Image (cartoon, rainbow, N blue to C red):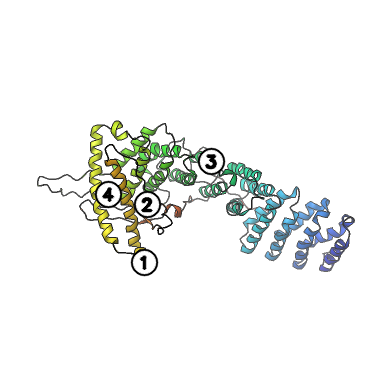
Amino acid sequence: MAVTIEDLYRNYGILADASKDNLSQHKDAYQVILDGVKGGPKEKRLAAQFIPKFFSSFPELADAAINAQLDLCEDEDVSIRRQAIKELPRFATGENILRVADILTQLLQTDDTAEFNQVNASLISIFKIDAKGTLGGLFSQILQGEDIVRERAIKFLSAKLKTLPEDVMTKEVEDYVFAETKKVLEDVTGEEFVLLMRVVSGLRVLQTVNGRQQLVELVVEQAFLEQALNPADPDTVDRLLQCTRQALPLFSKNVHSTRFVTYFCEHVLPNLSALTSPVAELDIQLEVLKLLAEMSPFCGDMEKLEANVNMLFTKLLEFMPLPPEEVENGENSANEEPKLQFSYVECLLFSFHQLGKKLPDFLLDKVDAERLKDFKIRLQYFARGLQVYIRQLRVALQGKTGDALKTEENKIKVVALKITNNINVLIKDLFHNPPSFKSTVTLSWKPVQKSEAVAPKRPSGEEMGSGGSTKKQISPQPRRDARQIYNPPSEQRGGFRGGRGRGFGTRGNRSRGRIY
């Protein structure tokens, strides 16, 4: 016979009135409450509240009680589910913590907003009971669960771990997070990689120089820097971009970017024009040059320093054209004047300048006379065109303040002026005899000082003819801190084919099954 509301209240009264010493003698009364999950909506709501209240007094019925509560967590009525989920943390005692955490992690797959929020709240509650046990349930589902559960569990960790206090996230707990995350990183998508790096980068235990170096090693392993780059494969290119972006905030004077910079010089720059962009709207050449420029100040000792500087020098020559030939009357030929690609040159010149500090005699002793003469001609021609463009920009912006500088056109001109001023400073250093590498500039897309206005969007490909008429092809490029991370178009884990079978790999989808 089905359990009624009256039955539930009566047996609840028996248990509530019993002394702690005698409570375990009323097993039959607790069983009636467990059977309440088979009743109607009202009975189920009461059972959801009564079952956890006396759970700890009947260890022999622990499995039955958890299973009964789990049935309510999967009820068709969302209000019953929310009530049952709200009470789940009361079962998280002793050995049950791992199971409760596992169940709550699976329940993250709900599409009901209120229910989802309740699952999050319950997970946070059991974190404060046993953080390591809770993480065990989360990582178990990340490693073995369904794709939707894995995805939401990773997002939960990324969003919530940083909000937990130090007395919850102890050193032991953080060490566990790092160890388990390394296991997960053996097979991840690009989006998962970014989220998991956010998790481990925020761990207090990894804020030391040694900790940051461990994180760089983690990224290096994902980036496959020991393998040659296939520039025609957008997934391979995307892997390198995402890994480099994750490594960038980790670099400092004590945590070096040497391996990434060397890889870019050896494998990326020689294939710059052949790179296949992972997304159509991305200027892939400018993107990799910007990343290289941002990494270059953090290089340590470099075995292949001369080769790397030489590659930067070679690539810089490609973007610094020779002046047009003059006909007998001294006028330029009818051929179209070369276009000056300021954005690319800023990046390459900055990187060359940074590495040149480590090899200051490169232009004096490492470059033959004919090549050096060619470089000086190109540099002088570029500098003349640069001065013309700087004057035009200053005239265009003269007297403009406040809202007038906030128009898209003027914001582009402001950044274009920053780019050209940077190039001008660096070129002046190279005109010194001997060449100097002492000047410092802030890359045009980097954040400005607090006293200045927020930097406007960066132009992507401004070009200009040296005769004074501008031929600008400028489109805004987001600042580095506003970049969107590209996600592979497939739903399989990864999209990066032909790898080593680990990291950004392919994982099959799983069909949804019953929570257990």
Residue at 36 percent of width and 48 percent of height: 441
For the residue marked with disc 4, what is the amino acid?
Leu
Identify the residue position indicated by label 3 in the image: 209
Relative placement, left or right, of 351 versus 201 is: left
- Nearer to me, 354 or 57: 354
**Mark 1, secondary structure of its residue:** helix
For the residue marked with disc 3, what is the amino acid?
Val
Per the model, the C-alpha gap separating discs 4 and 2 is: 17 Å
Of badges 4 and 1, the one in the foreground is 1
Identify the residue position indicated by label 4 in the image: 340
Q: Mark 4 or 2 closer to N-term?
A: 4
* 114 up-or-down from 186: above or below: below
Per the model, the C-alpha gap separating discs 1 and 2 is: 21 Å
Per the model, the C-alpha gap separating discs 3 and 1 is: 44 Å
Of badges 3 and 4, the one in the foreground is 3
Please state the horizontal and vertical placement of residue 480, each as a whole percent of the image: 43, 52
Relative placement, left or right, of 366 versus 145 is: left
Residue at 75 percent of width and 51 percent of height: 93
- Nearer to me, 219 or 215: 215
**Mark 2, secondary structure of its residue:** loop
Q: Mark 3 or 4 closer to N-term?
A: 3
**Mark 3, secondary structure of its residue:** helix
Cβ atoms at labels 3 and 1 below 8 Å apart: no
Identify the residue position indicated by label 1 in the image: 403
Identify the residue position indicated by label 2 in the image: 444
For the residue marked with disc 1, what is the amino acid?
Asp
Per the model, the C-alpha gap separating discs 4 and 1 is: 30 Å
Of badges 2 and 3, the one in the foreground is 3
Please state the horizontal and vertical placement of residue 398, each as a whole percent of the image: 28, 62
Q: Mark 3 or 1 closer to N-term?
A: 3
For the residue marked with disc 2, what is the amino acid?
Ser
